[in-house]
Amino acid sequence: MCFLSIKIFYLLSFFHFLVSDGKFSRPNIVLIVADDLGWDDVSFHGSNQSLTPNIDMMALTGIALERYYSHCVCTPSRTAMLSGKYAHVVGMQGYPLTNGEDRGLPLTHKILPQYFKDLGYVTRLVGKWHLGHSKKKYLPTHRGFDSHFGHRGGFIDYYEYILQETWSIGDVAGFDLYRDMTPAWDAKGYVTDLYNAEAKSIISNHDKDKPLFLMVAHNAPHSANMGAQLQAPPETVRDMRFLASPQRRIYAGMVKKLDDSVGDIVKALHVKGILDNTIIVFISDNGGATTGASVNYASNYPLRGIKFTPFEGGIRVNGLIWSKNLTKTNHIWKGYMHVSDWMPTLLKAVGATPPEDIDGIDLWDSIISNKSSKRNVIFEIDDYSGFAAIIEDEFKLVTGTIVTEHCNHQGRELRGLTCDPPTYRKALTESAVYSVITEMSIPFKLKDTKLREYMKIDCPENDNSEICYPDKDKRCLFNIEQDPCETQDLSSTYPDVADRLYSRLQDEIKRTIPRKVPLHRDLRAAPSLHNYTWTIWADEIASE
């Protein structure tokens, strides 16, 4: 009974800020999304490769999500995050949108910023969109956001803001940085810094009488264009000389700038006086691209697989929730959560009723009160690439064809050091978030860093010689609670489980709306026809 009373107290203490002078006051929501950040690339997972003290301080004083899953690539994960639906049921699964496709998140699906607008929120998007821009109706400012400063496609050069694609006619490139409907030709500087400055400006100029939904979807640490994939300020890279890999030094510099931005955003909220009434979410959109077409030398170690695969390294990603009102309940939440759950979960967090016609599940009460998850099944279906996976309780089944190189355990080769890395506790105390937490008198002791050890995944070293590789006729079954690195195939040990999961997966596949194939890049979208910008182009065709 005492334990129950404590739980009720924590829940009431969280919601105390929702009532002011007898009036209901909805909390601000800040959603920060990293792009292609690996599991091993945040230091609260135990790594010393790339220290992320600001992100860590939020995890250490908030709620770290141990089993948070996303789709394995950009467009599908953002589709699910904003629509509350699996990407495969809206036709947005598989290979991410290219800038030459006349396609976008279908308008029949109401998305998260539109729900927030209905609730009286000011809605802002900074950074990446990647859900369609061939027609005006697909753009974020026509899908519920009051403003957008950022790129519309999948990535951009960090200094020139150019996106390059390879078409049948050769390489095509165009400018892709916009302020609402206008190219931001006057922008200068490193794009992570630009997005950081924009987020701080939005917070500084926000009317505190209105609730704010701010989504900051960073380009970092996604790779840039071929030939110059890794880009970070030289002074930041110099600080990473303790890393043996030259590529990892640049990548770690990119992650540091991302972490600095998280700290600056928290500080800006504090200076504005609205941090007390704000819920902050930090997530990665999918696993890191250790190798492959969009390689950025991220590490999902020791998890198996990378971005573009349904293995844990592709879909089990970083996630946390922070609010001042959660600091007394800080814990590691062990339940399953999927990216599609953010819509109903955040709507519940602000006192709204989530829609029913979605795949996402409202997990708010489960997370903040540290109860078991209401989700026990997760699907990853990609009819374009030809693979699928299902997680049900402790078991996971993977089937279909996946590039063998992408299926392996990778990242250990990137962990070499030339000398001792910076001291972890020193990095924490020098972070902006630590300073803010200290000023707010939020209880935290430097010795309270056992989270790192708990979140660290240990698996036996594996040379990939005897692991199960799925194909169209072969299924691989794993117990991901006992074997999170997916090394032991249990399909012959538990054939009934494999059959049951396969049958359930096939039932879900029937809901799939096929991705528009073949991958089509319309020559009429070429930047050379539009002042060398990636811009709206299909509206012009429709009016002809």
Image (spheres, helix red, strand yellow):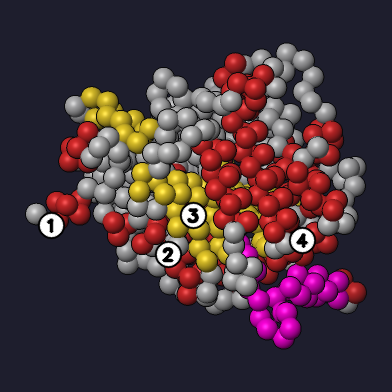
> Does the CB distance between marks 1 and 3 fall below 8 Å?
no
Horizontal side, residue 166 vs residue 351: left or right: left
The image shows residue 121 at horizontal and vertical percentages of 53, 69
Earlier-in-chain disc, 4 versus 3: 3
Label 1 crowd bin: few (<14), some (14–19), many (20+), radius 10 Å: few
The image shows residue 111 at horizontal and vertical percentages of 43, 64
In the image, farthest residue toward the bottom: 22
Badge 3 amino acid: Leu
Badge 4 amino acid: Lys
Q: Nearer the viewer, residue 195 or 320?
A: 195
Q: Residue at x 20, y 28 (%)?
A: 168
Badge 2 amino acid: Gly
Earlier-in-chain disc, 2 versus 1: 2
For the residues labelled 4 and 3, the Cα–Cα distance comes to 23 Å
Earlier-in-chain disc, 2 versus 3: 3
Q: Secondary structure at mark 3?
A: strand
Q: Residue at x 66, y 39 (%)?
A: 259
The residue indicated by pointer 4 is 324
The residue indicated by pointer 2 is 144
Magenta region: which residues? 5-31
Query: Residue 440's quadrant in the figure?
Result: bottom right
Horizontal side, residue 301 vs residue 324: left or right: left
For the residues labelled 1 and 3, the Cα–Cα distance comes to 29 Å
The residue indicated by pointer 1 is 543
Label 2 crowd bin: few (<14), some (14–19), many (20+), radius 10 Å: many
